Image: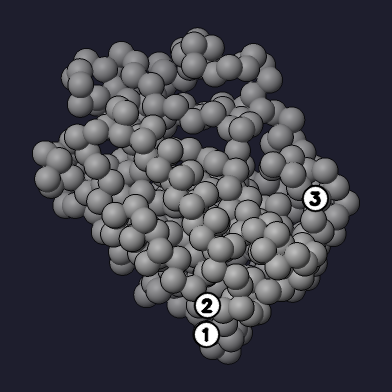
Amino acid sequence: MGIDISSTGIKLVELNKTRSGYELASMAVVALPRDAIVENTIIDSTAVANALLEAVALAKPSTKNVALAVSGNAVIIKTIQVAATTEFELEAQIEYEADQHVPYDVDDVFMDFHIQGISADDPEQMDVVLVACKREVVEDYQLVLSEAGLHAQCIDCGVFALENAAEITDEHVLAEGDDYLLPDEDAEVHALVNIGANMMNINVLINGRMAFVRDQFYGGQNLTEEIQKAHNISYQQAEQLKTESFSDIQPEALEHFYVGLTSELVRSLDFYSASRAEFPVRKLFLSGGCALLPNIAMELEQRLGIDTLILDPFQNIKVPARKFNSQSQRDLGPMMMVPIGLALRNFDT
C-alpha cells in the first residue's frame, strides 16, 4: 500500500491489479493534529503513529508492507552526466559522484540512482538521476511506521510518486516512441504540480523524461492564513470556512493566496527555463488537496497563460461500489495522486 504522510494527515491507498486494470482495494484519510509534522519533520511521533493505526483500522488493508514518500529540504534530486557505463559499474562509483553533488556527508544520507539514457548533448555521456535523503529523516518515518505495525518496503520521493500516478491518467499522454529531445514545437512538456497543505511538488517532464523537480513550502495552509486575516477568525474557523462555505470567503483573501501561489510557480518555472528555454511548459497538471478548490485550474491558467487541467487518478482505477461510496472516493481523486503513485510501485517491473 502507498501511504502519504503530510503535515495535515495520513492518506492510505492499496491497489490490486486485475486483468482489466487497477482496482481500489482499500483507502483511508485520517487528519493529524496541527504541528505534529512541521516542514516534513516529525515533531509528535505518537500522534503520527496513532493516526497510522487509525488509518489501518479504517482501511483494513491486506498487507503491512508500505511504500512511503519523502519530500522537502532533506531530499536532494539532481540529474548528472557521467561517462556511459553499465549500471553495475556505476554502482561502484556512485559514492564519488554523490560527493560532488550532495551537500551532505555521504555517510549521513541514503542514496539511489536511475540511468535515464544517453545524453542528448553528448553521446558518450549518459543522464543519471541521483537521489539522496538524510538518514535521520528516513529513519524517523520508518520508526513511526514500525510503531503502527507497518514495514517500509520502499522509500520513494513525492515528485516521482506523482509522476507514477500521472502515467495512468488520460491527460498525461506521452508522445509515441523514445525520442527525447524533439524540436520544441513537437515536444510534450508537462508540469505536474501537486499542491498540498504546506508543500508543493513540481515535476517537469519532456516527453515523459524528468527534466526538473522541485519541492516548495507553499500550499493550502497559506490560504487558511489569508482567510484568518481577512475574516479575523481562528485557524480552525478559517479551515472550516474554506472546506464548508468557500463562496463566503472574502475575495481579497483568495486574491492574496493566488498571487502568492502564482509567484511560487513562476519562480520554479523560471528556474526550469534557465536551462530548458527551448522547451517551454505546454500543459500544467494539478493535483493535491488544493486541486479541490473551486475554479483553481481556471485561475492558474489565466494567471500563468498555460493550459491547466486537474488530474484524477481514479478515472482509470475501478472503485468497487460494494466496498466504497464510489462518488465520494472519486471526489478525493486529485488529493490521492501521491499515495496512488506509491501503491503503483508494487507493480513496477
Q: On the picture, is 53 further left or further right than 87?
A: right
Q: Which residue is found at the position 36% from the left and 29% from the top?
A: 115
- Residue where numbered disc 1 is placed: 327
Foreground disc of the pair 2, 3:
3
Circle on res. 221: none
Q: What is the three-letter code of the residue carrying label 2?
A: Asp
Secondary-structure class at tag 3: loop
Q: Which residue is found at the position 63% from the left and 50% from the top?
A: 198
- Residue where numbered disc 3 is placed: 35
State whether residue 204 is above or below residue 90.
below
**Whole-Å distance between the Cαs marked 2 and 3?**
27 Å
- Residue where numbered disc 2 is placed: 331
Q: On the picture, is 307 further left or further right than 103?
A: left
Do we see residue 35 in this rendering? yes
State whether residue 153 is above or below residue 287.
above
Percent position (x, y) of residue 201? 51, 46
Residues at marks 3 and 1 touching, judged by CB atoms closer than 8 Å: no
**Whole-Å distance between the Cαs marked 1 and 2?**
6 Å
